[in-house]
Amino acid sequence: DQQVKQNSPSLSVQEGRISILNCDYTNSMFDYFLWYKKYPAEGPTFLISISSIKDKNEDGRFTVFLNKSAKHLSLHIVPSQPGDSAVYFCAASVNYGQNFVFGPGTRLSVLP
Amino acid sequence: KAGVTQTPRYLIKTRGQQVTLSCSPISGHRSVSWYQQTPGQGLQFLFEYFSETQRNKGNFPGRFSGRQFSNSRSEMNVSTLELGDSALYLCASSLADPNYGYTFGSGTRLTVV
């Protein structure tokens, strides 16, 4: 049973527009969430995190929103750039940062 | 600043053999985690070491084991290899403060034939 789901395997967005990547989870004990970006032949790169005591965290063009009641989080990228084209993984953990469970990933393509 | 280094990058082994993968974390990082990435299962957590002690373990059989040395370098061992063990094995290191996330290596691509 997948505890972390990313229901969109792929997403295409025009350069300059907003990219919204979604992630749903089933385990209400998750208290810490991360987003990673992965280019081919490289390991995932940490993007942004959010703990369950917050509902929003912003870092430059990246904003993560957490809706605990819906067990849903989303990553917004504004404005999207071609270099953002990658696979994005959502990850969640219990006890703040140990034993992360990853979603299957969403492939984002930003079109020039 | 050097990143997380995993060796070797590619490995081909035969069923039944055993394999050892190595991970050198970022200097100063004391936590090392291992993940298996496959097309069907995505990224799955194997285990995490902190200060030479395994403090978390995922749902993998006992054929998968690891250890961490006093310099924080870590090794992962898989015994009696099966075809299904073919995957990209990723190592990630952290200061152990989750606010900084984990830094991943480029991985070791293991192919079992």
Image: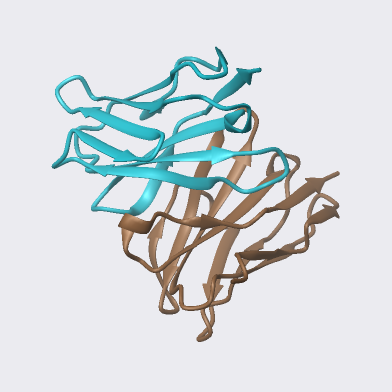
Q: Which image quarter: residue A27?
A: top left
Q: Which image quarter: residue A82?
A: top right
Chain that is brown in the image: B
Residue A41 in the image, given as x and y percentages of width and height = 73, 43
- Position of A80 compared to A109: left or right? left
Q: Is residue B86 above or below residue A89?
A: below
Residue A112 in the image, given as x and y percentages of width and height = 66, 17
- Position of B27 compared to B14: left or right? left
Residue A51 in the image, given as x and y percentages of width and height = 22, 44
Residue B22 in the image, given as x and y percentages of width and height = 67, 68
* Number of numbered labels in the structure image: 0
**The color chain A is rendered in:** cyan
Q: Nearer the viewer, residue A89 or B67?
A: A89
The answer to whether residue A1 of the structure is visible from this angle is no
In the rendered image, the quadrant that contains the C terminus of chain B is top right
Q: Nearer the viewer, residue B65 or A85?
A: A85
Q: Is residue A21 above or below residue B74?
A: above
In the rendered image, the quadrant that contains the N terminus of chain B is bottom right
Q: Which image quarter: residue A56?
A: top left
- Position of B18 compared to A76: left or right? right
Q: Is residue B33 above or below residue A106?
A: below
Residue at screen point 38% across, 43% down: A48
Q: Is residue B113 above or below residue A110?
A: below
Residue at screen point 55% across, 50% down: B35
The answer to whether residue A14 of the structure is visible from this angle is yes
Residue at screen point 45% across, 79% down: B52
Q: Farthest residue to the bottom: give it.
A: B70
What coloring was used for the rendering?
by chain
